[in-house]
Image (cartoon, rainbow, N blue to C red):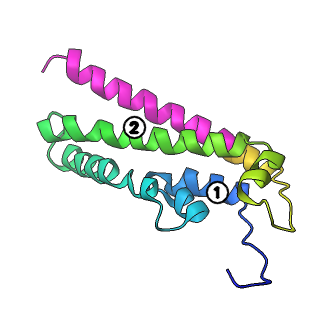
């Protein structure tokens, strides 16, 4: 940062949207902390392995061993990203500013944008986790 320049403002709604739409690739962490954030890169391997499992399930079949092992990783990655979207969206604006915008002149006023992101993340996260649970339990107890 150059001397005299204002620090970058980090929007809570933007961070929550990024977690909702691309959180499985750590987009919200890269927005907040930059590309050097090690934890932002952590979701990549299980997400890519889960996508490979999805591809195997669609083109080889759901009874494929590779799909059965890898696909639940995608569900867990999606669930974790959506949980982070909920946590970001529910954070109080004052607390958000204290953490991410301590020296910024602008203050957060997230309003309905963050609320809508939280509602969508709760719905999608519930569906992803229930689908993952059903897929795993079907593989364990479904016969075949």
Q: Nearer the viewer, residue 129 or 4?
A: 4
Task: Please state if 42 lies on the left or on the right of 65 as rendered.
Answer: right
Task: Please state if 30 lies on the left or on the right of 92 as rendered.
Answer: left
Residue 126 drawn at (x, y percent) = 52, 31
Q: CA distance from mark 1 to mark 2?
A: 20 Å
Q: Nearer the viewer, residue 116 or 19?
A: 19
| Residue visible at 83% across and 57% down in the picture | 108
| Residue visible at 67% across and 47% down in the picture | 117
6 in relation to 106, above or below: below
Where's the C terminus, which quadrant?
Answer: top left
Which SS type dominates the magenta stretch?
Answer: helix
Residue linked to disc 1: 15
Query: Label for residue 76?
Result: 2
Query: Callout 2: 10 Å neighbours few (<14), some, many (20+)?
Result: many
| Secondary structure at numbered mark 2 | helix
Task: Please state if 99 lies on the left or on the right of 82 as rendered.
Answer: right
139 in relation to 100, above or below: above
| Residue visible at 19% across and 47% down in the picture | 56
88 in relation to 25, above or below: above
Residue 95 drawn at (x, y percent) = 78, 46
Q: Nearer the viewer, residue 137 or 6?
A: 6
Residue 51 drawn at (x, y percent) = 30, 51
| Residue visible at 79% across and 54% down in the picture | 97
Q: Is residue 64 visible?
A: no
Q: How many marks?
A: 2
The residue range painted magenta reads 118-144
């Amino acid at each position: 940062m150059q001397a005299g320049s204002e620090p970058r403002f980090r929007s809570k709604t933007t961070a929550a949207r990024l977690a909702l739409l691309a959180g499985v690739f750590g987009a919200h962490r890269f927005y907040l902390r930059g590309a050097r954030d090690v934890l932002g890169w952590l979701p990549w391997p299980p997400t890519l392995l889960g996508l490979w499992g999805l591809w195997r399930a669609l083109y080889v079949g759901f009874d494929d061993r590779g799909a059965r092992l890898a696909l639940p990783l995608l569900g867990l990655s999606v669930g974790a990203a959506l949980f982070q979207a909920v946590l970001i969206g529910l954070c109080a604006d004052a607390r958000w500013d204290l953490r991410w915008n301590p020296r910024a002149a602008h203050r957060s006023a997230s309003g309905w944008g963050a609320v809508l992101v939280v509602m969508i993340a709760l719905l999608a996260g519930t569906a992803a986790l229930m689908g993952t649970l059903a897929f795993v339990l079907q593989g364990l107890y479904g016969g075949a």
